[in-house]
Each structure stands twice: as C-alpha cells, then as structure tokens.
Image: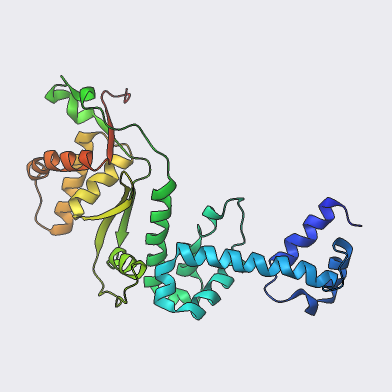
Amino acid sequence: MATLAETQAVLAVALRRSAPLAGDPELSAQAARIARGNERLSPVEQVDVYREQFWLRHVDVLRDDFASIRHALGDEAFERLARAYLEACPPASFSLRDLGEHMPRFLAERAPWSEDPFLAELAKVEWAFVDAFDGADAPPFDPASIAGRTEDEWPRARIVLHPALQRLSLAWPSHDYRVAARKGGEPERPERRACRVVVYRGPELLHYLEVEADAAAMLDELARGAPLGEACERVAREVGAANGDGASLEALEGKLAGWFADWTSLGWIRAVRFGEGGA
C-alpha cells in the first residue's frame, strides 16, 4: 500500500486531469497502488469518482461566482471556459471562496476569450462583489470624533474608508448587466460607456452605486491615504485637465460636504484621522 504522502501525490495529479483516468496507463497503475477496488468498480474507476466530483464541484462554484459570464456565453461555452481556467489556475487555497480570484486576468490574457474584453470586465465586476461580501469590516463612523475640529485641521485630515469598499473603473455599464442577468432577465450587451462604480456592503445586502468622475477620483485619493487638502488639489487638477475646463479647487470643495454626508450615511467613511501622523 502507498504511504499517505504518495497517495496525496497521486490524487493531486489525478484530480486535475480533465479526461477519465482509465485512458492513461501510468495513472491507472498508480490508482491501483492507492485504491483496492471492489465488485463494482476497479481501482482506477474508484479514483475517477473523486476526479469527476472535483470537476463538478469546482465548475459549479465558478458558475455561481460568474453567473453573468455564464449568461453571456451560454452553458456549454461557460463550462469550456471554466475547465480551461481550472487547468491553467488550479486551486491554491483550501477555501472555494478564492477559486475565481484569477478569472479577470485569465479572461484578459487567454485566447479566445481575450478577444472579447467585455468578458474580463464582467469578471472584474463579479469578483468585486465577492470581495465586498466577505472583506474586512471596521467600526462605524463616530460623529463625536470630529467635534470641535477647526477649519485649519481639515486639510491634513485623512479619511478612512470601509476596507471592503470596491471601486471600479469600467468601459461598459457591466454592473447593470450583471444584476439583470442574475435576476433571470435577458439583458443585451450594453453599449460602451465609461463609468465609475462603487460596490459596498449594506446592513444586509451588497449594493452598488455609479458615481461621477470627480467623486470617484476623490475616493481613489482617500483610499491611498492622501490628506484631504492634497486630495482636493490633485483631483481638481486631474478633472480640470480631463475636461479641458480648468475646474477650480473651490468648485470641488463645494461638493465635499454633500459627498461626505452621503458617503457617511452609506457606511463608506469609517473614521477621520487628524494630524500629520494620522493619529
């Protein structure tokens, strides 16, 4: 009989094989070393049961995690994609939650799927919802933490966003397609339209919200830890350059109060830290 380590080594190879094991003499011989067989199944057939279950289970997980891509491709084409993905990116974690982590990159790089960039974007959106669902949490914002702060302190303040907040820069409104497909509809592929989307956790459900370019740019600056004054100046320059209208810092600052009120009520802002050290 094989040792535990030898059994694990054989199974590690056998389970990832997409074709039945009986067609491979070497694997059939190895299967006979780790399984005894019975009146119904030979040793290789016994091991093949586990191989088949591996593929069924893992393809099914990908089907759930990337339901909008399954809708876009159809069932048969999606299964071919899932099997190709699993061969190229076999599971590296004990948790099935991580199984589809590399799907956006796989679709962007691997032909023939890379010929349709909409698929990679759908995968990015789907994975953002996975990350938002079970990402880290943080205590809710405490309004008392900003009481008594002077106007001069705010330019150095750092705004702490919810750690599970997902910010997406999209070339299509893929988030709308995802929702429609998951609700059982028959959405058409959308027209190309650049948009910025935030995916976030509500009290009970995941939500998403499309935001304007300047608000998205501000969220990006805050997420990287920029002090509020620096973030405002950078966003004003970037948005003004993009629009060709030299958007003023004053116009941007005029929007901040409304943004922060909305983002706090939605749970996006979790803390405000004052001072150079962020204390």
Locate residue 198 relative to residue 16 in the image: left or right: left
Q: Is residue 76 above or below residue 162?
A: below
Given residues 115 and 144, the one toward you in this image is: 144
Where residue 231 sits, quadrant-wise, is: top left
Q: Position of residue 177 (x, y in %)?
A: 31, 69
Q: Which residue is most to the front?
A: 39
Locate residue 30 relative to residue 212 in the image: left or right: right
Q: Residue at x 39, y 76 (%)?
A: 72
Q: Position of residue 237 (x, y in %)?
A: 17, 48
Q: How many marks?
A: 0
User: Can residue 88 be seen in the rendering of this structure?
Assistant: no
Q: Is residue 155 above or below residue 171?
A: above
Q: Position of residue 153 (x, y in %)?
A: 18, 24
Where residue 148 sits, quadrant-wise, is: top left
Locate residue 93 relative to residue 228 in the image: left or right: right
Q: Residue at x 58, y 64 (%)?
A: 58
Quadrant in which the C terminus is drawn: top left
Given residues 264 and 114, the one toward you in this image is: 264
